[in-house]
Image (tube, rainbow, N blue to C red):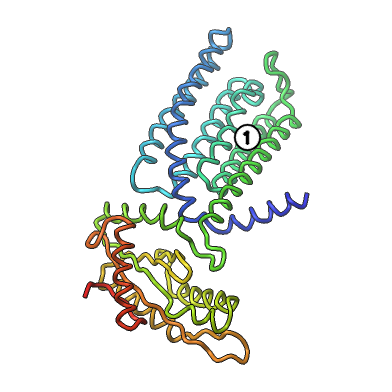
C-alpha cells in the first residue's frame, strides 16, 4: 500500500509539469504509430457490425455500428495526416484521444435512442473505452491518459443517467438483459481503474526516461538530450530557415576547487554555477551537462546575438562568486566558451560540437574567461 501511495503522490506531482522534450518527441512518434494503428483497428472493427448482421443480429444496430466505425476511419485519416507533418502539434494527442472516446459515446447514445437496453448494456461497444485509454500510453503523457479516461467515465455516466432517470419503468431487453445503476457504476469504476493503471504505467516510463536523460548532480539534461533532442531542434531550424547556435562551455580552473576544497565543495560549486546560469536562461535555451565541468547551450539566435548572450552569461557568473562555507573566502568562478552556428559552420550535432570545441580551445589559449565565436 505504501508503494501505491508513493506512486500516486509522484503521479500527482508530475501532473503539475509537462513531460520533458525527449518524452514529447517520443510521444510524437507514438502519435504517428497510434494513428496508423487506429486506421488498422478501424478496418478490423468493420467486421463487428458485419458479423452481427450475418449472425442474425439487428440490422439497424449493425448499421449504427458501421456508421460509428466509418466515423472513426475518417477521423483516423485526419489524425494520421496531422501526425505525419514535420511540425509537431502539441494539442493533437489530447484532441485525438478525446475524439476516440466521444465517438464511442455517440455510438452508445444512438444505440440507446433506439433501444436503451441495447445501448447501455452493449459490452462490445463499451469495451472500446478501455482500449482507447490503453492506447494513450503510446503518447507518453500521463495527463492525456487521465483526461481521456475521466472524460470517458463522465460521458458514459451522463448517457446512463439520461436514460435511466427518464425511463417510465425498467429498461429490459431479451437480448441485453436489464439495465441497472449498479452495473453502470461498476463499469464506470472499472474504466476509472483502467485509466489510473495506464496513467501510472505512463508515469513510470516518463520517470525512467527522465532518469536516463538527466544528470543526477545538477538536474540538467545530459548527453541523451544532446544526442536525441538537439538533432530534432536542428532539423526544425533548417526547415524554418533559422540560424541556431551551439555553445560549448567549460568552467575555468575548476579542478583547483576540487584540489583545494575537496570534491564535495566541488559539487556545490558546480551546482552554484548551474543555478546562476539557469536563472538567466529561458525555456527555449536548453543547457546540458556533457562532461565533468563541460556544458552545452543551444541558442536560437544568429551568431552575433549568440555571442552577446554568452558574454552576458559569462559576466553574470563572474560577478556571482561561490562561497564554499561559512568562514571561507568567496571563490570567483568564470567560464570559457566556443560557439558554432548552423548552417554556417555545420548542419549536424557532431560538426557543431567539433567546431565549438576548436573555438573553446582558442578561448582557453587566449587567457580563458572569454567567448570565441569566430576563428582567429
Residue drawn at the location 49% of the way across and 44% of the way down: 94
Which of these two is toward me, 156 or 324? 324
Q: Count every numbered label the image shows and give the total.
A: 1
- Is 43 situated above or below 315? above
- Residue furthest out toward the right: 1
Rendered residue at 54%/11% (across/down): 53
Q: Quadrant of residue 128?
A: top right
Q: What residue is at 59 percent from the left and 38 percent from the top?
A: 152
On the rendered image, what quadrant is the C terminus found in?
A: bottom left
Location of residue 68 with respect to 296 vertically, above or below: above
Residue 281's spot in the image, x, y percent? 43, 71
Dot 1, how many residues are within 10 Å of its Cα: few (below 14), some (14-19), or many (20+)? Answer: many
Q: Nearer the viewer, residue 115 or 318?
A: 318
Residue that mark 1 sits on: 156
Q: Nearer the viewer, residue 147 or 202?
A: 202
On the image, the x and y values in percent for residue 364 come to 34, 78
Which quadrant would residue 246 be assigned to in this image? bottom left
- Left or right: 305 with respect to 162? left
Under circle 1, the secondary element is helix
In the rendered image, the residue lying farthest to the front is 259
Residue 231 screen position, x and y as percent: 36, 53
Q: Percent from the top left, x then y, of residue 239? A: 27, 51
Residue 263 as seen in the image, left or right of residue 173: left
Residue 233 lies, with reference to residue 285, above or below; the image says above
Residue plotted at (69% across, 35% down) = 190
- From the viewer's side, name the closer residue of 314 and 265: 265
Q: Say whether residue 163 is left or right of residue 68.
A: right
Amino acid at each position: 500500500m505504501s508503494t501505491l501511495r508513493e506512486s500516486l503522490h509522484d503521479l500527482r506531482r508530475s501532473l503539475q509539469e509537462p513531460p520533458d522534450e525527449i518524452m514529447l518527441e517520443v510521444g510524437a512518434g507514438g502519435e504517428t504509430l497510434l494513428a496508423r494503428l487506429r486506421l488498422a483497428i478501424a478496418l478490423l472493427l468493420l467486421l463487428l457490425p458485419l458479423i452481427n448482421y450475418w449472425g442474425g443480429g439487428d440490422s439497424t444496430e449493425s448499421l449504427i455500428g458501421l456508421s460509428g466505425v466509418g466515423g472513426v476511419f475518417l477521423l483516423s485519416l485526419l489524425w494520421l495526416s496531422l501526425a505525419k507533418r514535420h511540425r509537431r502539434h502539441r494539442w493533437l494527442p489530447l484532441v485525438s484521444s478525446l475524439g476516440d472516446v466521444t465517438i464511442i459515446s455517440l455510438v452508445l447514445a444512438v444505440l440507446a435512442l433506439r433501444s436503451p437496453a441495447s445501448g447501455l448494456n452493449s459490452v462490445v461497444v463499451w469495451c472500446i473505452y478501455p482500449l482507447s485509454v490503453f492506447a494513450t500510453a503510446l503518447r507518453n503523457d500521463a495527463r492525456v491518459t487521465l483526461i481521456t479516461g475521466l472524460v470517458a467515465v463522465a460521458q458514459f455516466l451522463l448517457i446512463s443517467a439520461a436514460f435511466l432517470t427518464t425511463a417510465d419503468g425498467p429498461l429490459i431487453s431479451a437480448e441485453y438483459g436489464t439495465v441497472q445503476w449498479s452495473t453502470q457504476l461498476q463499469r464506470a469504476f472499472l474504466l476509472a481503474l483502467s485509466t489510473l493503471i495506464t496513467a501510472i504505467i505512463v508515469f513510470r516510463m516518463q520517470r525512467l526516461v527522465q532518469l536516463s536523460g538527466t544528470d543526477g548532480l545538477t538536474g540538467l539534461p545530459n548527453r541523451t538530450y544532446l544526442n536525441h533532442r538537439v538533432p530534432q531542434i536542428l532539423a526544425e531550424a533548417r526547415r524554418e530557415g533559422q540560424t541556431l547556435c551551439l555553445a560549448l562551455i567549460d568552467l575555468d580552473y575548476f579542478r583547483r576547487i576540487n584540489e583545494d576544497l575537496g570534491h564535495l565543495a566541488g559539487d556545490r560549486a558546480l551546482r552554484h554555477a548551474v543555478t546562476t546560469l539557469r536563472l538567466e536562461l529561458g525555456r527555449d535555451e536548453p543547457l546540458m551537462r556533457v562532461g565533468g565541468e563541460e556544458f552545452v547551450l543551444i541558442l536560437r539566435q544568429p551568431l552575433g546575438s549568440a555571442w552577446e548572450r554568452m558574454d552576458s552569461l559569462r559576466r553574470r557568473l563572474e560577478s556571482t562568486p561561490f562561497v564554499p562555507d561559512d568562514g571561507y573566502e568567496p571563490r570567483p568562478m568564470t567560464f570559457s566558451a566556443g560557439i558554432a552556428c548552423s548552417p554556417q559552420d555545420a548542419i549536424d550535432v557532431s560538426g557543431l560540437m567539433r567546431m565549438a570545441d576548436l573555438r573553446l580551445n582558442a578561448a582557453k589559449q587566449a587567457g580563458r574567461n572569454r567567448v570565441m565565436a569566430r576563428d582567429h
